[in-house]
Image (tube, rainbow, N blue to C red):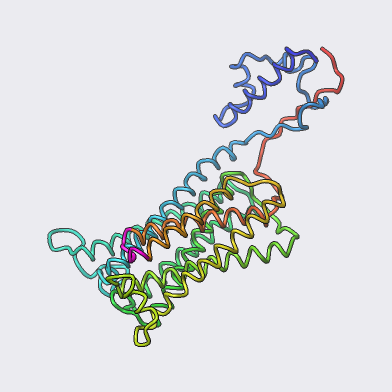
Amino acid sequence: MGAGNLRRIEEWKTALWKIVCKGSSVGQRLAQTGFSTNEMRGTGAITESTYWRFWPKTVLLPSPRSCGISHVARFAWTALCWNVAVVLWGAYVRATGSGAGCGNRWPLCDGDVVGARAQAQTIVEFTHRMTSAISLLMAIGLVVWSWRVTKRGDWVRYSALLVVALLANEALLGAALVLLKHVADDHSVGRILFLCLHFGNTLLLLAALALTAVWLSNGSRSFTLTGKWREVSSIGLGLLATMATGITGAVAALADTLFPSTSLRSSLMKDFGSVTPALLHCRLFHPAEALISACSVLWIVLGSFARRHRFSRSAIALIISILLQVAVGIANVFFLAPVWLQIAHLFLADVLWVLLVLVLADLILDRTSSSEVNVLPSFVKEGQET
């Protein structure tokens, strides 16, 4: 086959990639590129009855439905970022003691939220409720949009539905904290329990959103669990350890808010004192759990990718985020957990969790089908000359 004909075929391939997502038919757009139908039918051209050893047997082109998936994927990533922002604002509500800003009414607010009479705590709490409501509306929109651009059996549909369910549960847990008066200066066992449930649900929500966004972005729709059960088990334990670290971190942050310290020495004396509240003793679990989970995750990720002789960008970013999170956690202890550093610590925890979920999902899930595509037969007879 001549060099000119090979170049012409490569130009056809590039042109087809550019035109499908613009909503026009292949024939119309090919006419605009200068290729005629006769050229397509000519000797050495791409036909259904020919074979060419240098090309894959099919050229996969995105269908109009696949082009629409890129837009819904952007919306899914936006929803993920929005929910991370809502989580951080919720931490600000807790750190500033604004949880009782609207009284014990939910979802309405017992107090002015605008005007000169509005109190800062009321505005902070009401803003958190409004942003949470927007999150729920975005999740519902994500479900509708995902179902329109995917087909039956695609995992994206179920992960999007899971997002709505987890967001609804998030709202109910938040309402329980308010209605049961587990806010402000309350440090009862009930508040600790609901706080653990609340933050655990938040981690699951971010995981579902991240997987939905990634699956919509790369066109992966259906998977099977890898048969390496030993690796799957270790990854599952790593996820549970990381979740436990996040939950104990939420408890430690609550203790820092309710029982602020004036120095590192006084903070340590409170932690190990015999007459201090139980919440302060619980704070001790977080550093130990964080060290264990960081070591286990690094061992899993480094070992798994070393056996595959490759490291993805997500895995590298995960390793960096773990090291950075440990450094910020140590700074949080030495600087006595100021509000801004607590929020930065939580932000890194959210990023680390999302990266961890994506990296480990890539390790244990084998793709079984790709996104819906248009298939252009591209066969040129082996040895055919022009």
Left or right? Give the position of 115 relative to 24: left
What are the residue bounds of the magenta stretch? 334-340
Q: Which residue occupies the extreme bottom position in the image? A: 275
Rendered-image quadrant of the C terminus: top right
Q: Closer to the camera, 97 or 257? A: 257
Q: How many marks?
A: 0
- Is residue 281 depicted above or below 307 in this figure? below
Please say whether residue 255 is one of the residues in the magenta stretch: no
Q: Quadrant of residue 241?
A: bottom right
Residue 27, percent from left and from top: 64, 22
Q: Closer to the camera, 374 or 88? A: 88
Q: Closer to the camera, 294 or 213? A: 294
Residue 360, percent from left and from top: 62, 56
Left or right? Give the position of 89 relative to 44: left
Q: Which residue is rendered at x = 36% and y = 72% of the image?
A: 254
Q: Closer to the camera, 97 or 30? A: 97
Q: Which residue is rendered at x = 44% and y = 70% of the image?
A: 198
